[in-house]
Image: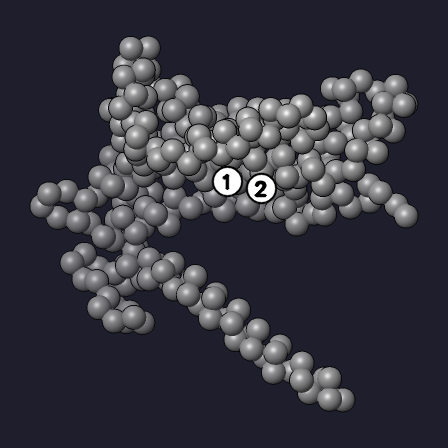
């Protein structure tokens, strides 16, 4: 009885903490929605202030009206992010597996070298990437943006995948080898299905980085390849800032990310080695 009485305040405290964290997380999104529905020239000045003249005018502009829609920009961002994610995941699966199973002394140093490369600020690489893209005629192309994003995503992806491969028991591979399976078949048929949650998590990080990238898109884009962040930033000019259109565009721009989370959520919540090893 005393034990139950002591645990109640802790559970209540934990519930209050979770509610506060959720409120703090969702409050900016709530403000974004209210701003997108506010009339032109009118912004909420108080925390929970809501205009009496809510309008969907700005959603109509970014979704329907010719010349201001976001569909082409969202398509460019999705294509770039998808290509980067596919290429990086392929590299991360083999790289993470190699680092996880490697035994030579230099592997640890190479692994930390990858992390150091990831720590380099992207702004330091803007000028070299701009020069390379210009010389290779990759300015204002999807390929140019893809090649610019890949080096910054591969180190993080390999680091994440190595952690998931480390959890998989090596006995599973040994059993597969005894049964006559080759190395590629062991990786794709035995190991990879077990680390699908890791692949899903890594895919989310890589996709979000490329989809939301502003720095390299601003540097390498001109006319043909205008991604979503560049389009949203275009609502801010030297004379005015269209906060409502920016907010509406930001909310509409979350649609691909929401769809991605819906598609891979079952892999994220799945157990890493669930059912693989039985006692």
Q: Is residue 175 left or right of residue 103?
A: right
Q: Residue at x 30, y 30 (%)?
A: 124
Q: Residue at x 27, y 45 (%)?
A: 61
Q: Which residue is mark 1?
A: 205
Residue 30 placed where, x, y %? 37, 62
Instruction: Name the foreground residue: 227 vs 36.
Output: 227
Q: Which residue is mark 2?
A: 201
Residue 165 visible to an observer of this rendering: yes
Q: Is residue 81 left or right of residue 86?
A: left
Label 1 sits on a secondary structure element that is: helix
Residue 221 visible to an observer of this rendering: no
What's the coloring here? one colour
Instruction: Name the foreground residue: 250 vs 6.
Output: 6
- Is the N terminus in the top left, top right, bottom left or bottom right quadrant? bottom right
Q: Is residue 254 left or right of residue 66?
A: right
Q: Residues within 10 Å of mark 2 (few under 14, many from 20)?
A: many
Q: Is residue 264 left or right of residue 195?
A: left
Residue 118 placed where, x, y %? 44, 33
Q: CA distance from mark 2 to mark 1?
A: 7 Å
Label 2 sits on a secondary structure element that is: helix
Residue 48 placed where, x, y %? 31, 72
Q: Residues within 10 Å of mark 1 (few under 14, many from 20)?
A: some
């Amino acid at each position: 009885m005393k034990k139950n009485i002591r645990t109640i305040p802790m559970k209540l405290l934990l519930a209050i903490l979770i509610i506060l964290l959720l409120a703090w997380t969702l409050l900016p999104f709530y403000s974004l929605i209210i701003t997108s529905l506010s009339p032109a020239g009118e912004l909420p000045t108080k925390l929970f202030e809501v205009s009496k003249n809510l309008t969907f005018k700005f959603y109509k502009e970014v979704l329907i009206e010719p010349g201001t829609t976001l569909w082409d920009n969202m398509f460019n961002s999705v294509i770039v992010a998808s290509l980067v994610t596919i290429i990086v995941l392929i590299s991360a699966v083999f790289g993470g597996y190699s680092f996880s199973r490697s035994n030579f002394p230099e592997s640890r140093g190479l692994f930390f070298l990858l992390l150091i490369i990831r720590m380099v600020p992207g702004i330091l690489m803007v000028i070299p990437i701009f020069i390379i893209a210009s010389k290779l005629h990759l300015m204002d192309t999807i390929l140019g943006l893809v090649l610019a994003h890949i080096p910054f995503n591969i180190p993080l992806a390999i680091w994440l995948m190595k952690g998931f491969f480390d959890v998989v028991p090596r006995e599973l591979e040994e059993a597969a080898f005894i049964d006559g399976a080759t190395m590629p078949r062991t990786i794709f048929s035995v190991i990879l299905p077990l680390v699908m949650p890791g692949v899903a998590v890594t895919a989310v990080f890589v996709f979000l980085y490329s989809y939301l990238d502003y720095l390299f898109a601003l540097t390498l884009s001109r006319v043909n390849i205008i991604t979503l962040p560049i389009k949203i930033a275009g609502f801010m000019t030297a004379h005015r800032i269209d906060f409502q259109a920016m907010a509406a565009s930001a909310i509409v721009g979350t649609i691909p990310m929401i769809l991605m989370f819906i598609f891979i959520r079952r892999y994220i919540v799945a157990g890493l080695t669930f059912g693989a090893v039985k006692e």
